[in-house]
Amino acid sequence: MTQPCIIHNEATSECYFEEHCYITEWWNSPHDEEASVACARVEPGVTTRLHCLKGVTERYVILEGKGCVEVGELAPEAVGPGDVVIIPSGTPQRITNIGSSGLIFLAICTPRFTRGVYEDIDSDAR
C-alpha cells in the first residue's frame, strides 16, 4: 500500500479456527503484505493448540480476560488486559483462558498471516 486509505470492516465475521479459538480478521490483505491484525477469542478453560508461525513474528495484545501463555522456552506466565506477548518466527506458542469469561486479544502478524505459515506442532497433530 502506497497511498493513505481507510478500511471499513462491517462485513467481517467471527469464524472458528481449528486452533481451538475464534478469529475475526480485522486486516489481512494481499495488498498489504507487511502486516495483518486479527481479533482472537478463547473460551473459558480452553487451551489453543501448540503451534508456530513460519517466517512470521506475532504479537498478542491482550484486550479482555485472563490467560496463561506459553512461548518457546519461557515459563508459562499469566497475562491480562494491556499485556503484550512477542512471539518470534518459528517459536512454539499456545495460550489458555484461565478466567471465567472470554479471553480476547489482538494477533498482529508481520509479515501478514497466511494459512501456509501455520504449523500445528501439538503432540496429537495429524
Image (cartoon, helix red, strand yellow):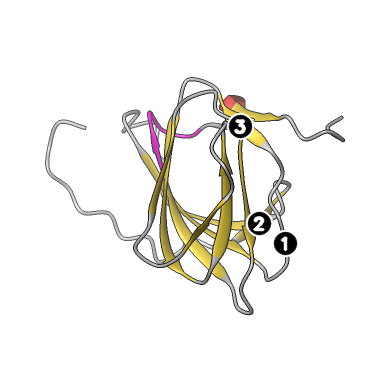
- Judge whether 126 appears above or below 103 on screen: above
Q: Is residue 87 magenta?
A: no
Q: Which amino acid, mark 1? A: Val
Element type at marker 2? strand
Name the residue: 67% across, 68% down: 43
Percent of width and height locating residue 61: 39, 55
* Foreground disc of the pair 2, 1: 1
Q: Are marks 2 and 1 in contact (CB under 8 Å)?
A: yes
Name the residue: 48% across, 25% down: 89
- How far apart marks 1 and 3 lie (CA) works out to 17 Å
Percent of width and height locating residue 15: 63, 58
Which stretch appears magenta? 108-113
- Judge whether 124 appears above or below 82 on screen: above
On screen, residue 82 versus residue 2, left or right, reads right
Of mark 2 and mark 3, the one earlier in the sequence is: 2
Q: Which residue is mark 2?
A: 21
Q: Which mark is residue 17?
A: none
Q: Which residue is mark 1?
A: 46
Percent of width and height locating residue 123: 83, 33
Q: Nearer the viewer, residue 59 or 78?
A: 78
Quadrant of the drawing holding the C terminus: top right
Q: Nearer the viewer, residue 24 or 44?
A: 44
Element type at marker 3? loop
Q: Which mark is residue 92?
A: 3
